[in-house]
Amino acid sequence: MGVDRTNYLFLGWKLKVEITDYDSFLHDVCYEVASDNFIRDDECEEYCFYGKVVRFSDRYDDGFSQEEISSEDLTLQPLEIIDLKNKFGVFMPGEELEDWVIFQNPRLFLFTHFS
């Protein structure tokens, strides 16, 4: 018997979710406006990340199949960073990404979502 799951390789920033109304943020921004740019914990609201999905698995039984990923896939180019910062300002008018992140440089994260 398998477990339904989706794995994500995600490149971006961890947000300081405690500085916002998390429920409103999830609904207004993550779900309605920019769902492709956010990975969030819907169950216990412990994390929210902003950036881009590098890869995700569509194999619900055992996660990732063999994937070849280049070093370019694992970094954000300067223009990509500028684009993501500008998009964040559109999602959150009047806000700067730098004020919402725990660390300044983007990092790589691996997530598994069970359903």
Image (cartoon, rainbow, N blue to C red):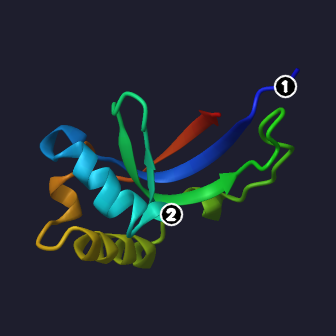
Q: Quarter of the image containing the N terminus?
A: top right
Q: Which residue is denoted by mark 2 in the rendering?
A: 36
Q: Residue at x 58, y 39 (%)?
A: 110
The image quarter in which residue 29 lies? bottom left
Q: Amino acid at mark 2?
A: Asp
Q: Residue at x 68, y 51 (%)?
A: 56
Q: Amino acid at mark 1?
A: Gly
Q: CA distance from mark 2 to mark 1?
A: 27 Å
Q: Which residue is denoted by mark 1 in the rendering?
A: 2
The residue carrying pointer 1 sits among few (fewer than 14), some (14 to 19) or many (20 or more) residues within 10 Å by Cα, namely few
Q: Secondary structure at mark 1?
A: loop
> With respect to residue 86, does 62 lie above or below?
above
Q: Is residue 7 left or right of residue 29?
A: right
Residue 63 pos. (x, y %): 77, 37
Q: Secondary structure at mark 2?
A: helix
- Point out the tag, 2 or 1, that comes first from the N-terminus: 1
Residue 113 pos. (x, y %): 60, 36
